[in-house]
Image: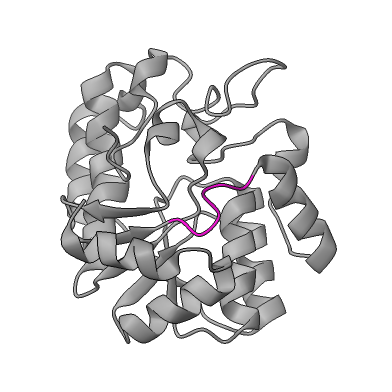
Amino acid sequence: MSELAQNIKQQVGNLDPVEALRLLAERFPGEIVFSTSFGWEDQVITHMIFTNNLPIKIFTLETGRLFPETYYVWNRTMEMYGKPIHAYYPKHELVEEMVNTKGPNSFYESVDNRKECCGIRKIEPLKRALAGNNCWVTGIRADQSANRQFMDNVEWDEQNQLVKYHPIYSWTLDDVKEYIKKYNVPYNTLHDRGFPSIGCLPCTRAVQEGEDFRAGRWWWEDQSKKECGLHAVK
């Protein structure tokens, strides 16, 4: 962990998520962003930021292949809080070249093809969204996957050269659900139909009882490859 990340970890210490977010917004004025994909966890953090008027820019990656339910909760969230959520789209030239060369569903054919699609639709737009910022807030929780249990609530992102903060890293899924119910936070109704983790429509399915939290993401691949590259894991 970098010295800066270590310092931030000490500062947030025992602060609750809102207090920590406020401190980071003061520490990185105009240089702190939160990425949302409109899942349970992200809606909790969006509520914290918007209701407390924290100066943290919220953005999302519009891959062009999201569920209708995701677009609905996106629109409902903007209506409810009256604040913007900034969209970052993939570069159309890259999408066109990939689809023209390999077809619209090439990601099913190999891990490399899937990573290429994620790279074009998510990784490259993410780099633009993070450019010029020094702190990236996410909705990651430790029990979302085996890989994420080895992360920390504050990290140094070597790839993007900034501090990452996961305000509800230690929360359980029940904690998240209770918060959403208590504050009447809008959420993606796919969660009620067996989708704990929601990404692009062609790459996400409902999970069966007893399956891993992220089993529905890229379900045709080996379990060990269930990350798209947005969050590097050790």
Is the magenta region chiefly helix, strand or loop? loop
| Depth check, front residue: 92 or 226 | 226
Q: Is residue 136 visible?
A: no
The vertical placement of 154 against 21, above or below, is above
**Is 158 contained in the magenta span?**
no
Q: Please state if 222 lies on the left or on the right of 187 as rendered.
A: left
**Snapshot quadrant of residue 12:** bottom left
* Nearer to the camera, 190 or 133: 133
Residue 111, placed above or below residue 151: above
| Whether residue 4 can be seen here | yes
Query: 158 above or below 104?
Result: below
Image x and y of residue 32, in percent: 34, 75
In magenta, the rendered stretch is 166-171
Give the residue at x 40% y 81%: 25
Where the C terminus falls, by quadrant? top left
Please tell me which residue is depicted at 34% across the width and 32% down the height of the picture: 104
Numbered label tally: 0
- Give the residue at x 62% y 60%: 43
Name the image colouring: one colour
Look at 83% across and 63% down and name the residue there.
Answer: 182
Residue 89, given in percent of the width and then of the height, sits at: 33, 60
Determine which quarter of the picture holds residue 24: bottom left
The one nearer the camera, 55 or 62, is 55
- Residue 31 is situated, as x and y percent measured from the top left of the image, at 29, 79
- 66 to the left or right of 180: left
